[in-house]
Amino acid sequence: MLKVENITFSYRRKSRPVLDDFSLDVEAGGVYGLLGRNGAGKSTLLYLIAGLLTPKSGSVLFRGLNTRLRLPSVLSDIFIVPEEFTLPRISLGDYVKANARFYPNYSDEDLRRHLDIFGMSADLNLGALSMGQKKKAFMSFALACNTSLLLMDEPTNGLDIPGKSAFRRFIAGNMTDERAIIISTHQVRDVDRLLDRVIIMNDSQVLLNRRIDEITARLKFFNTDSREIIESALYAQPSFEGTNVVLVNDDDSETELNLESLFELSLLKGALLKDMFNR
Ligand SMILES: Nc1ncnc2c1ncn2[C@@H]1O[C@H](COP(=O)(O)OP(=O)(O)OP(=O)(O)O)[C@@H](O)[C@H]1O
């Protein structure tokens, strides 16, 4: 569905590229978690995918069309929810009237259903909402546009605890084989059970882009008190219940991915991880 091909991008001509010969494939039918340390270029990547920034070289192809050309057929099938945004001080109804027409698969019924998950009604004035409520309303509209590609930058920032669990239901209940959702986040616990794939960015490149089952086939994640295991682990982090460890899965163990441990491991031993998954 989406091919990011050898993109190099910097904000200023002489500055170090944020993305350097960066490539990524995204297929329909999955929720992708996009992880990377602060400043790794996650938001920049989402803007490039949406065609809002121009790469110095390389291209982003959505169903074979360059997104930077901003063709109506492409723009009507991609929606980006930035980390921060402003909404006009109008009713949600007027906002929908003005914007839904750009999205041929928009559904009013879906909008109401999504708002309901967040405990909100469609009778809203966008100018009178808190930041979290604004986010819930905008994400509900974004998903109701039923675009094939939905890009979300830190979607759970600013949501309260019930809002975060509603967010998980909101995404999980609306995945189809036709759409892909890319969620950039630091709040790994808010999304870890939602994800089909994990993309980790590091040093202006993709360090890892794998399905969860591919990751747990090669690595095992568990909690232990055993000093011997802790000492032989690729990664070990003390927690309330012992120590979270990551080890090479050399005995076909079936364990649940600990996204936080995987991410920390990628920061500490990126080259090893890359080598392990590219072998
Ligand atoms: N408008 C801009 N002008 C100049 N530099 C920018 C601009 N936006 C981002 N940058 C720089 O580009 C790099 C990547 O930023 P980006 O926001 O894409 O990272 P990120 O991975 O989303 O970070 P975070 O996790 O902190 O949100 C950073 O070094 C940042 O300082």
Image: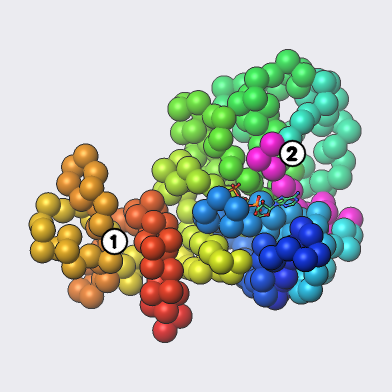
Does mark 2 have its CB less than 8 Å from ligand 1?
no
Q: Picture quarter containing residue 90?
A: top right
Magenta region includes residue 29: no
Check the picture and name the quadrant holding the C terminus.
bottom left
Residue sitting at 72 percent across and 47 percent down? 80
Check the picture and name the quadrant holding the N terminus.
bottom right
Magenta region includes residue 83: yes
Circle 1 or circle 2, nearest the eye: 1
Q: Is residue 200 visible?
A: yes
Q: Is residue 62 visible?
A: no
Give the Cα separation between the discs numbered 1 and 2: 46 Å
Q: Amino acid at mark 2?
A: Ser
Along the viewing direction, whichever of 128 and 63 lies nearer the viewer: 128
Magenta span:
72-84
Residue tagged by mark 2? 107
Q: Position of residue 125 (x, y in %)?
A: 76, 17
Q: Which mark, residue 235? A: 1
